[in-house]
Image: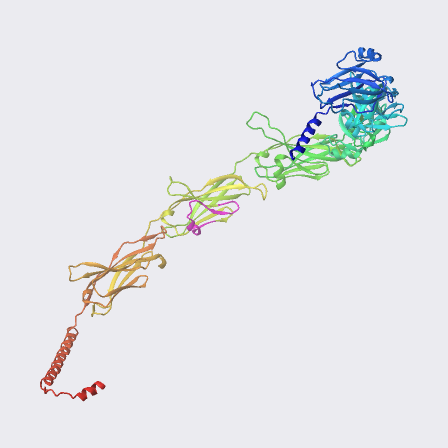
Amino acid sequence: MDCLPALLFTVFMLGGGWARVVKVSPGPLIRVEGQPVSIRCDVREYGGPREQDFEWMIFQEGSSKKTKIISTFDAAYSDPSLSKRVASGDISVVRLQDNEVELKVAEVKASDAGFYLCMTPSTDSVISGNYEEHVQLIVIPNTLKVSPQAPPPVVPEGSDITLTCNVTREMTQPTYLSVTWSVKKGTSSEDILVFGPQGEVAVGSKFARRYADGGIRLVPGRNGVFELVVTRVTTSDDGIYECNGTEWTHEEGGRWVKIVESKKEMGTVSVTPTGQSLSVKLSPSSPLLLIPGNALTLLCSVSADNLPALALEVTWLLDGRDIITMERSGVVVSNSSSPSSSSSGGAQGRRGKVSLERTGAGEYRLEVRAVSGEDGGAYTCRVRAFVEKGGRSSGGGGRWHMAAEKTSSTVAVKVATIKPSFSLTLDPVLTPQMTADPTEMACHVTNITHLPPGGRLAVTWEHTPLPGEADDPPTSVPIGSLDAKGNLIPGQLYTDRMKSGALSLSRIQPNTFTLRVLQTQEKDMGQYVCSVSAWTLEGQGDLIQSSEFRSSALTVRWDAKRPTLNAVAKQVREASVGGATFEMSCTVATENLGEAGYSVLIQSQDSLQGNVRTIMTLSPDSVMQHGGATDPNRRDSLVLTKSGPGEFRFRLAGVQLSDRGYYWCDITAWTKQQPGQTWTKATSAESNKIRIDFQENGPSFSIAIQSDASTVYPWETAKMECSLSVSGSSPKTDDLAYEVRWFFTRLRGGQITSQVASVDRFGVVRKDARNSSSDVSIERKDTHTYLLNIHGTQDSDSGEYHCVATPWYLSPSTGAWTQAAELTSSRVFLTVKFAVWDSLKLPLLYGVVASVGVGLFSLVLGLVCAHCCCRNTTHTPRSRNKLMDLEMD
């Protein structure tokens, strides 16, 4: 029971899957008389062979009569009324696929309107579904009319053209219209804009940017009138313009079908380039002769066919250089490179007196106020015409391109000037006789004529060195200049000297200029020339050079004597012994040398063939430094000072053996051009050499020993004193130390000498091992006295004692601790006495005590023995009661 519903469902599905479905194009189909018509028909979900056959019929609404049109399998199927049209191909059927065909009518007639029936013969095993389907065809008359208005055949560049097209049709069925403007260039045609059929706008790819900028505008009108405005045309807009009207129907499924169209040529449009009509004229055109201070006025006239549509950029040129420009936006810009860069006024002055303004349509006036000689030349007017590709509605944000450029004819302008004239004389004021002397010369301007009011003078100084050994002649070098405004402009090679004041340029009178060198150097010898230029003051306060004159050369030369320097060293204090002070002085004598500073090097060598060492240096600024050969620990002992204008002193305190050798001064003279400048080396020399030579004479030492007592008793303390003395060059207490050792010789025992104790020069005491029970100690009483103490003397301490000392002293000659010769003292004898009573009284005391003790012990022992032997030995028994009592106790 449960399987029956599933089986029925399967059978139903299988049966339903093979239900034949025939479909035709959705209708109704509205077509225009005389236009082609195509109707598609297809079959699906059928059985039998894959290729299906189709039959077409037509019938009218409300009539049962059906007229056969055409069949895919029966050539004689067509009705006799349609057989000729089928045979001519006016009516045909085209198989698109095995199950799809298309009925085509080349030129539909009004009588072709009706219902078209598509049938498929059955090839199914079971008849199911539909085997035919029909669609209505409505044929309307062709009422589409396209009436374009011819545009102007020739338009100037930058103008607007309006393309007017009238597209109409009679409204019998719900159809729609669209209009297309296109331009044809040669054999290719490009769509500009399409409007419709539902009011939408489509723009051609090449015109999209222009349409977005507002350069192309659509203006729909009434009664089928449509206008397309193309603004600011250029030469690229040349061509044949066409208007295409199209009638559309909107079929089921949202598909738009074009049912008829009509294309008409509107006319050929030729755009005249701006360059053909652009004209630039300059007035006045005849040459002009002006007097300095007058105003120059020139007018540039621009004309063109479509001047209001052009944006003009006007530039005035003088001798081919831009002077001033009015941009297409109306902004006036002065060209800073137009005037000469060497003029005093410069670009700022030219901008102040040159103006440009627009006086009318295409009229541009140039005015140069207070002309001068530099304003003369050839003037031209250059015009650049720009066309905006964007539309007027784009708010000025369109794209500009230069359509043409033209330059006017040239007008010559000459400024008659009378140049100032004057004479120059260059006279010496101070002539140097030797190097470092001052030099001064004056440049006098006389016989000045034609210098206008407000005119000024400027001077430039030049120097040409004397010829050298090279073949090339010397070249002139600029020293510096004072311009017309009094500004000092130093030459590149003289900048530092002018800043320091070593060289100065000045104007002491209105017509006199001076050059002064504070300390003339040999390189300053040569020829000097002054050049004076006259500058004219213009109306705007700018200075323009009008004339220049050059003086004759003035030679500055002297017999250059080389400066010399002589240094003499003298010994002031002689160092004859170590530790003494050595002092020498060095005196300087110079010739052909002015004020100078000196640097001093104190040098030495062990021998005349030894290496030279630098001990100390003193700079020209009196800065003292120690040389690399100086021991850092001895720098306080070295002194180098300037003791006079040309005298220096060197002092070495505490000479040592290592200081022996030759000493001298190496002196260099330095000069300055000006205070604050760096030193310049002039000359140098070495002095004679002074020798330090002495022999080492150390101190003399002696030693002595003495004892406080030569005889002592046992257990007493014996004291022996070792005294040292020094003579000769006695060193300081802190520079002296001793090593002391004590020796002992036993009289009995083979004359063996052994060391008892010692103390080194640092005060460390050491005691040697001894066979006696006594003890020793060493005591330093003062710098030269040492004491040996023997505590608890014994008989074994008897013998001869002596001390050995080694002196150490700090040598003033070497600066190091020096060990002197070892010193040995004489011998002293120590006797430890032996006392007989003292040695016997203790044994006798021990004997008496022992005898008395033995006697007393014998007496007591006898008494005890007698008592024990003489007692009654009879035993008396103790009563039991006593025992009990004792027990109880």
- The foreground one among 813 and 30 is 30
Q: Is residue 649 visible?
A: yes
Is 495 on the left-hand or right-hand side of 312? left
| Rendering coords of residue 638 (x, y %) | 44, 50
Question: Which of the two residues, 134 or 203, is positioned nearer the viewer here?
Answer: 134
Q: Is residue 810 left or right of residue 476?
A: left
Q: Quadrant of residue 222?
A: top right
- Residue 679, relative to residue 74: is it above or below? below
Q: Position of residue 232 (x, y in %)?
A: 82, 26
In front: 237, or 148? 148
Residue 90 is covered by the magenta coloring: no
Image: magenta residue range:
618-640
| Viewport quadrant of the C terminus | bottom left
Count the numbered circles shown. 0
179 to the left or right of 870: right
Quadrant showing the N terminus: top right
Magenta span includes 629: yes
Judge by depth and name the residue closer to the eye, 871 or 347. 871
Q: Is residue 685 above or below residue 808?
A: above
Residue 680 placement (x, y as % from top left): 54, 40
Q: In this view of the protein, can residue 368 be seen by the observer?
A: no
Residue pictured at 71% horizontal, 21% vertical: 124
Among the 4 quarters of the image, the one containing residue 802: bottom left
Residue 769 x %, y %: 23, 60
Res 219 quadrant in image: top right
Query: What colouring method underlies this structural image?
Result: rainbow
- Judge whether 426 appears above or below 117 on screen: below
Q: Residue furthest front?
A: 1
In the image, what residue occupies the spot 68% across and 28% down? 11
